[in-house]
Image (cartoon, rainbow, N blue to C red):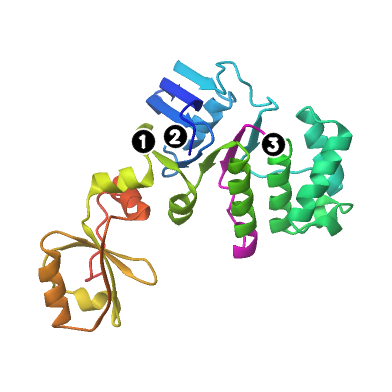
Amino acid sequence: MIPTDSAVKLTGVTKTYGSHTAVKDLSLNVPAGSIYGFIGPNGSGKTTTIRMILHILHADSGTIEVLSKTGTRASNDKIGYLPEERGLYKKMKTLRLLEYYGSLKGMSRKDAKTEGMRWLERMELTEWADKKIETLSKGMAQKIQFIATVLTRPRLIVLDEPFSGLDPVNLETIRAAILDLQRQGSTVIFSTHDMDMAEKLCDSIFMIYKGEKVLDGTLHEIQASYGKDSIRLRVAEGASTLEGLPGIEKVLDMGKYLEVKLQGDSNAFLAALLQRTHVQLFEEARPSLHDIFTRIANPQEEESPNE
């Protein structure tokens, strides 16, 4: 069960850049011990919000409380931050780099080395301990930066697009590590454009759009607020089979199935569809997070069977 106390609390936070309001009157509560997803289109205010939480940027108004303090700095040894813009000292050897990052967070060199080797073993990188960072592949370097972020077992971990560019095996390794860190008591703020990963990994999800909060809650709560107006559908001929059927507002091709936003009676729609083709899958469902995201961020977009 997720604790009810807050790891991060924002109240009425606003941040402007000249005449542009990046974040407007934002209030947010991130429960301690949770994995909290931050989603939103590029330029929505997501990164600005993260940087204010870390006190890299200062809010124009409102209050920000992090780990029960209002003056927490990004360098605090209780916080780990993995920015979207990756960067490591390329000439340093891998284990020495981890020792260095550990020392910046208050660890002794001995403890940082021990913990660093433990993580290298978990990530299957022990043979690279004495190799320079510049010799690592992009995926390996990304795992090293993740290790550097969590090496000191911070109470609050902020990850900005941690899975970007990872292959499926490395993605699963990092995902499992995040869940283990949560089980050990860390709170994880997880910023992503991957709606599928947000659905699977996050306890709660916050969406910011044009600087304002538009979603905040568990996936179940968010989906419930949108009702059961979606059909998950699979037919042999694909979307072209749906052309001309009544009640269809939108069709999203999700790869293995079509997600149909329907207005009207689903039974009547199914009956009409069965007159045309064999239906392999027909499931009434709440809209996916991907669908909800696109409804908010691109409300004018209409994908129809005729396109």
Q: Which percent across, then down, holds residue 221?
A: 32, 43
**Residue shown at 34% from the left, 71% from the top:** 257
**Residue shown at 54% from the left, 27% from the top:** 53
Pointer 2 or 3: first along the chain: 2
Residue 100 appears in which quarter of the rendering?
Answer: top right
Question: Real-space Cα distance between discs 1 and 2?
Answer: 7 Å
Report the residue that reaches farthest toward the front.
1
Question: Real-space Cα distance between discs 2 and 3?
Answer: 28 Å
The residue wearing badge 3 is 153
Please state which amino acid type lies under the numbered disc 3.
Arg
Tell me: 211 left or right of 59: left
Tell me: 250 left or right of 210: left
- The range drawn in magenta is 153-171
**Residue shown at 81% from the left, 30% from the top:** 107
Quadrant where the C terminus sits is: bottom left
Q: Residues within 10 Å of mark 2 (few under 14, many from 20)?
A: many
Tell me: 225 left or right of 288: left
Residue 157 shown in magenta: yes
Q: Which percent across, then down, holds residue 13?
A: 42, 21
Residue 225 shown in magenta: no
Q: Which of 261 and 218 is in front in this view?
A: 218
Q: Badges 1 and 2: C-beta atoms under 8 Å apart?
A: yes
Label annotation for residue 210: 1
Please state which amino acid type lies under the numbered disc 1.
Lys
**Residue shown at 16% from the left, 73% from the top:** 270
- Describe the element under mark 3 as helix, strand or loop: loop
